[in-house]
Amino acid sequence: MKKRILGKGLEVSEIGLGCMGLSFSFPPFPTREEAVSFIRQAYNKGVTFFDTAEVYGPFDNEEVLGEALEHVRDKVVIATKFGFSYTKDGKRDGIDSSEENIRRAIEGSLKRLRTNYIDLYYQHRVDPNTPIEKVASIMKEFYEQGKIKHWGLSEASANTIRKAHAVFPVTALQSEYSLFWREPEKEIIPTLEELGIGFVPFSPLGKGFLTGQINVDTPLEPGDFRLSIPRFQNKEYLKENLKLVDFVKELASKKNTTPAAIAIGWVLAQKEWIVPIPGTKKIERLEENLSGAEVKFTQEELKEIKKRLDEIELIGDRYNEYYKSTIDKS
């Protein structure tokens, strides 16, 4: 697989793997042995960029990744995230980027990932109670100690990105971006381009919606994160938004490929420093996602696609009120 560069020098496979669904938010989950095997198969197919987080599980997602990649540690890029506190029984207990909590988090992640450094360490959510400049200075210290190679932000505003970058250069921003959610085009992507920061979109398949496998009657497993999302909860929203899926299917037919490949190929075509991290648990879906790198669009095609997208009015929020409140707007 071809490589792409995030920020000022982090080389990764042009499509990464979001590992969250292996143990968090999208049941049913594979066994640990199955998850380890799946990650290793992804590596064998050319994926070298793996994304996890302390909160996925919590904790066990990092453990699975650590076990799966320990034998090829120097050949892969591991990204994980900090920024939540936990109760004594291990349940998530709110956003927390206090210095004490960050130092606790990195030591735990290093241990679970079976490594002495993290390639890309993200703040998972901006903490309104901790100045981002303080967080950046701690990241600089970790870099100087060799505990991290790069750092990043997740779901941060343009203003926060600028403040953080001024203290210690940010390598990548992670946020949702897809044909189903194009909000970053307004302010985030121009800011990243100006500052030379890479973009790592999660949910490039619109949480599965853009695969064409979801309709108003598709059942979701109890505990599936999408059951909390207005765009998936409301059948009228789903029915209306299927106009986008019909368009993606139309594009797939013209390119002799699948809707999923079109969705990922489109994201890749936006900027050469964008690296999507679709998540899946099935090898056939992984192969389909990776085929997105083979989909090419001319500039004229991209202009026409943008025109059509602007004409399709999508309805419904991407998060419920609680999750919307965790997104940085500062």
Image (spheres, helix red, strand yellow):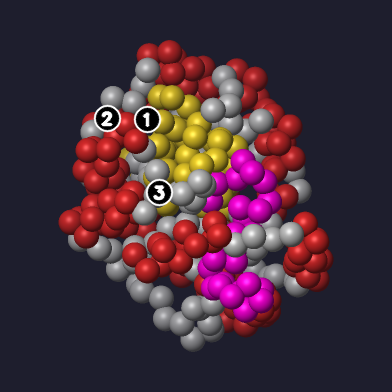
For mark 3, does the 10 Å Cα neighbourhood hold few (<14), some (14 to 19), or many (20 or more) residues? many
Secondary structure found at label 1: strand
Relative to residue 253, is residue 273 depicted above or below?
above
Foreground: 41 or 109? 41
Which mark is drawn over residue 68? none
Q: Is residue 270 magenta?
A: yes
- Label 1 near label 2: C-beta < 8 Å? yes
In depth, the one of 123 and 291 nearer the eye is: 291
Give the labeled residue for mark 2.
115
Q: Residues within 10 Å of mark 1 (few under 14, many from 20)?
A: many
Quadrant for the C terminus, please.
top right
Residue in the picture at 66% in, 53% down: 269
For this view, does 47 lie left or right of residue 2?
left
Q: Give the labeled residue for mark 3.
A: 47
Q: For residue 236: magenta?
A: no
Query: What numbered label is drawn on residue 118?
Result: 1
